[in-house]
Amino acid sequence: MRNAICGAVLALAGLGAAGPAAAQTCGGVYTVERGDSLSLIADSQYRDAGKWTVVHSSNLDAIGQNPNNIRVGMRLRLRCIDGLPTGLPGGQSVTETEAAAPEPTALVVAPGNAATRRKINILTGSDFWPFTDKSLPKGGVLTDVVQAAMEAADPEQGFAIHWVDDWASHHEPLLSNALLDIGFPWFQPDCESDPETYRCANLLFSESMFEVLMLLFVDKERPIAFNSAADLEGRLICRPAGYSTYIFDQHGRNWLRDGVITLEAGASPGDCLRLLTEGKVDGVVLNEFLGRGKIKEMGLEERVVVAQGQPISVDGNHMVVHKSHPDGPALLAVFEEGLAKIRADGRYQKIIDEHMSRVWAGF
């Protein structure tokens, strides 16, 4: 096997010291008023209309994929980001928020040994910010979720998380040969529309751990909006080479098959954004966090923006197991049992809020 399999992850978590007591609260519940839109809510509560996507993604269960599906009286949960919003009901005190946020700590990776084969061996990799990366606090938001869910499930045989940064090896051969048991995080295609695509034909998926918006990023000097396929007809869209393209041909869409759009395969997310600013493509499709992070890294905040309208899609992040694994369904059931427990007792939401508040504060 061309990859050395790293051993179990030992998470080192440190808590920052709480600041002085304060009556002010951060985050909470916002009730939609007449005339509101997600942009107006973001502008009034976060002082940044561009943060409409964080309002959307934090309330996908209520709003759905179309950000215009809000109504008067709807209660929206707003995360605490950089101390905003303040004064909303249900918010945390500033001291609670500060105490809940750990200082960034590295993960220590120990060499594996034969004993770990008796455990449920879970596979992930780095360089998928902010979801999984050894350098992120607690290994990233989804590593933290998986760790908490498996601890809640408390399987008799125990479990271990392994890091293999060659993502191309995860499905084949590591999971397909049961060299490791289950892996995360993976997007699930529309298997009803295309059951023969590799992931649908070969993998079983858990319930989604976290939904992410796939957004269209455009040049502020050549803005386009996305509300329907007609808005993208004839457009040249960049998606990095190796990234999934099923989002363009699912749920009744046939954008690639019918030639509605033309796809440009950039060498990397940064290459796609460069092509955009050079006027060589009309838009770039990336997940929200990757796109915003790369824009900041390249200093393009004043040039590249999220297209007005709707997300291209909303994709869930899943735990997967190869269909050839003899214990595959049972292993997924263990994970889902733990995930249900931490959702029910509030630990899941606390983990998400802790990480997402940090991530959004960095944009």
Image (cartoon, rainbow, N blue to C red):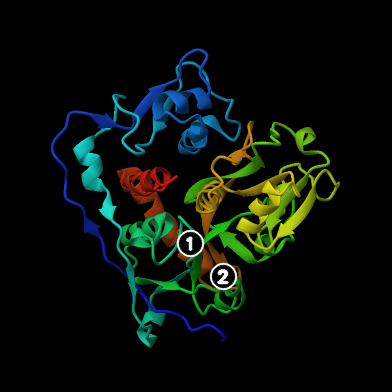
The answer to whether residue 346 of the structure is visible from this angle is: yes
Residue neighbourhood size for the residue with mark 2, other residues' Cα within 10 Å, grouped as few (<14), some (14–19), many (≥20):
some
In this view, the residue in front, 359 or 354, is: 359
Residue 154 is situated, as x and y percent measured from the top left of the image, at: 31, 63
Residue at 70% across, 31% down = 227
Q: Residue at x 33, y 57 (%)?
A: 148
In the image, residue 1 above or below residue 329: below
Q: Quadrant of residue 323?
A: bottom right
Give the labeled residue for mark 2. 167
First in residue order: circle 1 vs circle 2: 2
Real-space CA distance between mark 1 and mark 2, rounded to the nearest whole angstrom: 20 Å
Whether residue 156 is visible: no
Quadrant showing the N terminus: bottom right
In which quadrant will I find the C terminus? top left
Q: Which mark is residue 58?
A: none
Look at label 1 and name its amino acid.
Leu
Q: In this rendering, which labeled residue sits more in front, label 1 or label 2? A: 2
Horizontal side of 100 relative to 53 (left or right) equals: left
Which mark is drawn over residue 332? 1
- Outermost right residue: 258
Q: Judge the density around disc 1: few (<14), some (14-19), many (≥20) Cα neighbours within 10 Å.
A: many
